[in-house]
Amino acid sequence: MKEYNHLDIEKKWQKKWVTKKVYKASNKSKKKKYYVLDMFPYPSGTGLHVGHPKGYIGSDVFARFKRMQGMNVLHPMGYDAFGLPAEQYALEHNIHPRKAVEMNIKTFEKQLHNIGLSFDWDRKVNTTDPGFYKWTQWIFLKIYNSWYNKDTDKAEPIENLIKIFEKEGSKKINAVTDNRASFSAEEWKAMSDKDKQDMLMRYRLAYEGYSDVNWSPKLGTVLANDEIVDGPNGPVSERGGFPVEKKKMRQWFLRITAYADRLLTGLNGLDWSEHIKEIQRNWIGKSDGAEIPFKIVFKEGKPGIIPVFTTRPDTLFGATYMVLSPEHLWVTLAVDDDHIGVLDNREEVKKYIESLKKKTREERIEGKEKTGVELRGIKAINPANNEEIPVWIADYVLADYGTGAIMAVPASDERDYEFAKKYKLPIREVIIPKDRGNLELPITGEGFLINSGKFNGLSSEECKKSITKEVGGKIVSKYKMRDAIFARQRYWGEPIPLMHDKNGIITPLKEKDLPLKLPEVKSYMPTGTGESPLAGVSSWMKKGFETNTMPGWAGSSWYFLRYMDPKNKKAFVDKSAIKYWKNVDMYVGGAEHATGHLLYSRFWHKFLKDYGLVITEEPFQTLKNQGMILGPDNRKMSKRWGNIINPDDVVKNYGADTLRVYETFMGPFEASLPWSTDNIIGSRRFLDRIWRLTERVSKKAKSTPIFESVLHKTIKKVTEDIDNFAFNTAVSSMMILLNEMEKMEYVKQSDFELFLKILNPFAPHMTEEIWSMFGHKSFLVLEAWPKASKKKMEELEVKFIIQINGKVRAETMLPKGLSENVVLEKIKALPDVEKWIMEKEIKKVIFIKDKLVNLVVF
RNA sequence: GCCGGAGUGGCGGAAUUGGUAUACGCGCACGACUCAAAAUCGUGUGUCGCAAGGCGUGAGGGUUCGAGUCCCUCCUCCGGCACCA
């Protein structure tokens, strides 16, 4: 018999599969489509360790399974090569990022090939390819040229908005905007081009703004909130662990907040783990509450209005002071030199604001103790009872949440309580008084205590609504999620296709001028000043091109669409391709992208949906997150611990099929587990035993009903398990089947071939080899998936479990389908049963057909 | 602090709607083959006990004929969010 030489066999079939293009997906197929996608990797340079392919192997088993089930499977792979990781690698090794990316992709691809993954390589995409990023830029321009209409709940072209401004001004517009100003058509027409641009910028879905950003001096760039983690000495960058501080900078933003509600409700219909959905829900952070207008009065002059946001408008009677965020526009104006005299303690307030500015983000969080200062000279009026209350500014009120102002109710809010205690502000029980202040609440009785839950005939929700309505407030929802910063001061990213002229007017590039290619530069090192390296390129600056580049998540937010039609030069994807492939059916990747890539992609997809460019509301219907593979020492695999297992070694020593079987068998797909150099031998033995068994496979051999029943039950189990991503139990049931076959003298070839087919997704090379050894000319990977025969699964005899008082005392084989009485007669005669029921009365019998009898005796 | 997930042999882990706890694999022990070893094959392997039998799924209680699975209280670990009004 031939030896099981995994090296030769695997190389041979990998080559054949590639040359015959057996994994090619067709855009013109009458078959049902199925799109199985892996999160494409950053080609990082250090190559793969055995943890990386765990997800790829899982999705590959699944894709092969769906293919054999007769579907037109799209299973592509590509590279996310822009962004920090690739650039960091290039800097460390002192080569051009493009060169580094090319090299790393080569390594990656070789490693992926060795594992026998069934990708359609003709559809490979690379985000750094100008043919790809042309369309990333194109989508950006679409976003830039859009605003969000809340009435239609959709993104719409900015031209529509301009037309409305020209016709009737801004008053009737219901848009997502950070602009509260209103103007007439005449006022709009009178504006300068620059003013018009600034005004529109407040509506655009991609906009330029100035804000405190997370600045990493070491990386020389700005980072998004989800790229930062807490370090021992304050926040640090997720990649590299470099310190991060606050800095005010010019930035491009994407108005993801416009989609907050759709991103939240869309989660309900997705087949994702509850865990990931919960992370996204938390991140979006919806709070239902109300905006309550408070009148602000001065010693002299006209009163103003400041709305506060609260989730507890029902506690309005317990408000004893108001707090504004130190960055509140009102405060900024009040300390302004033009407004001397408004505040009695202007210098004190100014000093306090200055002291906060000096504090870094980490100091403000670490200190935790709340600080603040009263704005002397102004008072707020509680609209419920006309009471005058003091106005403070304090660091515990955030400028960019709610309205940046709160009513403080120390009796019901812990933070307000703490602050009130510290500054000796009044604390009062939240009682709605007998006279109900100014309100006409439909409440009977003496007045009541909110916090004790006594609402006197009014539910807490009704109470909130009534009070809000009666004081002229409005019910609103607020979100924790912030707009996403869409700019990096780095070289290695997609250029933002905009031009600035001397007067500050911004012009988007025309579609025909895309892609705006990244220029060659002498130094792509970060400048460290916050300026992008592109600012040092004179030809670039002469044309006034934007110097920021896009962040790493730009390309990854839509790459899965490009796979549908990767070579199209006329459109980002052809309409017919979108119509056929629709969206990703099965998406596999790490859970660490929950608040980054997975959220941004949903956002872009919804935007594209608004323009009819895609036809589904969600990009990824089902999501599976593979667990990590830890080092044998139970620590995360890293150079630092020296615990990295290289898949190349495993493939060389044991074979790709063994690697695949082991990684699927080692535990549940979503679990993080340590690699075990001992356990992998079990998977290899499994394959060795199959190989040896082929000697006893014969066309002439006869099958038995009992074996057929085991075989077909295994087919059923493996089919269901793959569908549920329960690969470990699928493998285990095939091991059980093998144990059965080994007990037989000869195995019927047609039976064995059914086994080969269900094993094929796990061990495609070896099963293909055996298939051809049997004389088949076809590819096993293209054979049809077997169907479990109901008839053959049926058994004539069943095992009955016999319990006495709930404890298992005996078991016996009995013909199927017997009635309770017949079974009772039979089992009572069994010695193991008899000794337990002797001289006792059977009080009760629990009978489960074909399965179990429980006798309750005394 | 809040939210989410999980605790089962020496180890990785199985266990439809409550119905044989520890499938499958690793490891270990003994045996066969061998001059010997490796490989391979066979048998055994939760725990106490000579046995009959008892006890066993993080801890304690409950529901039930019967609980790893359901309910209550608590402990531990992992992940996410964190001055969001």
Image: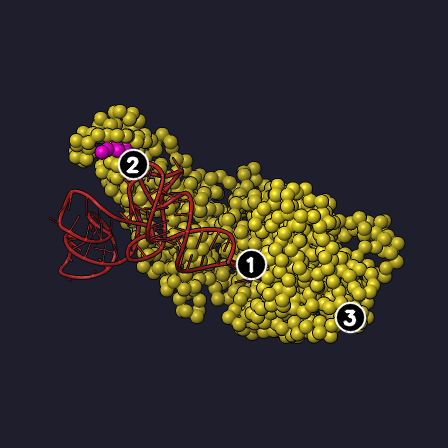
Chain colours: A yellow, B red
- A152 vs A52, left or right, is right
> What is the three-letter code of the residue carrying label 3?
Asp
Secondary structure beneath label 1: strand
Instruction: Decide which of A155, A435 is in the foreground and name it.
Output: A435
Disc assigned to residue A79: 1
Q: Is residue A251 above or below residue A166?
A: below
**Is A261 covered by the magenta stretch?**
no
Disc 1 marks a residue whose amino acid type is: Tyr
Q: Considering only order in the chain, which callout, 3 or 1, is on the residue closer to the N terminus?
A: 1
Front residue of A228 and A805:
A805
Dot 2: within a 10 Å radius of its alpha carbon, few (fewer than 14), some, or many (20 or more) residues?
some
Residue that numbered label 2 is attached to: A707
Q: CA distance from mark 1 to mark 2?
A: 47 Å
| Whether residue A159 is visible | yes
- Disc 3 with disc 2 on a shared chain: yes
Question: Which amino acid is tagged 2?
Answer: Phe
For image coordinates 69% across by 48% down, the residue present is A436
Q: Which residue is mark 3?
A: A336
Question: Could you say which disc has been placed on residue A205 in the image?
Answer: none
Q: State the quadrant of the C terminus of chain A.
A: top left
Read off the chain for label 3: A
Residues at marks 1 and 3, CA–CA distance in whole angstroms: 52 Å
Verify CB contact (< 8 Å) between mark 1 and mark 2. Answer: no
* Picture residue at 85% right of the left edge, 49% below the top: A167
Element at badge 3? loop
The reply to whether label 1 and label 2 mark residues of one chain is: yes
Q: Is residue A485 left or right of residue A123?
A: right
Q: Earlier in the sequence, mark 1 or mark 2?
A: 1
In the image, residue A94 lies at what x, y percent?
56, 74
- The structure residue drawn at horizontal position 86% and vertical position 59%, both measured from the top left corner, is A191
Is A853 inside the magenta-drawn segment?
yes
Q: Which residues are magenta?
A: A852-858
